[in-house]
Amino acid sequence: MTLVFFGAGAFGLPSLDALLASDHRLAAVVTSPEKPSGRHLAPKPSAVKLWAIQNHIRVIEMASSKESECFAQLKEIKPDLFIVIAFGKILRKNYLELPVLGAINVHGSLLPKYRGASPMQSAVLGGDSETGVSVMRMVEELDAGEVCLTKKISLQDKETIVTLEPKLSALASHALMESLGPIEARKADWIAQDPNRATYCAKIKKEDGRLRWDLSAQQLDRQVRAYLAWPGSYTLCKGKRLVVKVSRPEISTSPCKHGQIQRVSPAGIAVATSDGCLVLEELQLEGRKTLRASEFLKGTPLKAGELLE
């Protein structure tokens, strides 16, 4: 088959490697335009664009100002199938109808659960025992198409987005390659999603990382693990941003206020929540490096009774 891959993030790279090694023809990758990044706001290419350059694959950038140009280039390719993984954009009807076999998306959840932009983080936030990937036929409605293949994995007790993402990225690659044969032969078993079981997850914003001490310790620990890569989970300590890298929930019946430090020790800083306390084990104060609690307390002395906001 002649394939075109749509993606931006590193999540799709194992799938690209597998496609390149297959008997299929990867005619091009479509990705987002370079974005300003870093201190000097230098243009930064997407992970998919870098991969394509290194592997001598044609790159097509999809920008709203060059929509017709992008579509014309894709039309010239005469694609059999579009493959979309971690692209971050919704394809309109004219794109979906262009390939002979349509367009598929490999989504990082067990659809119809967690349709939307942050399924992996949502699985950690939800305390799920399992998650996985789904190969879905793309339609105009968000992540609502028929599914031909799912693959599951179990989540570990202290799973973080940093440990989960590479597992699902590899799983997505296996699911994609397993689905291509039946799709090409038009023998894939497409099963409609039950809309009554659908749940949605929004794009994560920077401010979502703020720790709300009126939540339970269990919820806050999941947040720390879900948002570890970005945006990070933070509170304010003496007016400075304090990012929590590693934490653990602990049962507590202390009458402390939400956000009040209950206990300070080299093993961690216990902070009162609505249910139990969250023990902060690894932290990063604004402008400083990440430290274990024992080292952090040497430079930033804290005592029981102080408030984190």
Image: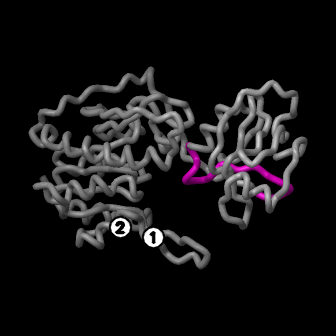
Q: Are marks 2 and 1 in contact (CB under 8 Å)?
A: yes
The image shows residue 187, relative to residue 75, as above or below, that is above
Give the magenta range.
Answer: 226-241
Residue 45 vs residue 224: left or right? Answer: left
Whether residue 207 appears in this view of the structure is no
Mark 2 is surrounded, within 10 Å at the Cα level, by few (under 14), some (14 to 19) or many (20 or more) other residues, namely many
User: Three-letter amino acid code at disc 1?
Assistant: Glu
Outermost residue, right direction?
Answer: 305
Residue 47's tag is: none
Of labels 2 and 1, earlier in sequence is 1
**Residue under pointer 1:** 34
State the residue at coordinates (35%, 63%). 48
Q: Picture coordinates of residue 142 (x, y %)? A: 42, 39
The image shows residue 33, relative to residue 199, as above or below, that is below
User: Three-letter amino acid code at disc 2?
Assistant: Lys
**Residue under pointer 2:** 49
The image shows residue 264, relative to residue 229, as above or below, that is above
Residue 64 or residue 85, whichever sits in front: 85
Q: Picture coordinates of residue 29 (x, y %)? A: 28, 62
Where, by quadrant of the figure, is residue 239 drawn? Answer: bottom right
Q: Picture coordinates of residue 84 (x, y %)? A: 32, 50
Q: Secondary structure at mark 2?
A: helix
CA separation in Å, label 2 and label 1: 9 Å
State the residue at coordinates (29%, 31%). 146
Residue 148 or residue 259, whichever sits in front: 259
Mark 2, mark 1: which one is toward the viewer? 2
Residue 177 vs residue 220: left or right? Answer: left
Q: Secondary structure at mark 1?
A: loop
Where, by quadrant of the figure, is residue 139 drawn? Answer: top left
Where, by quadrant of the figure, is residue 253 drawn? Answer: top right
Q: Picture coordinates of residue 58 (x, y %)? A: 25, 69
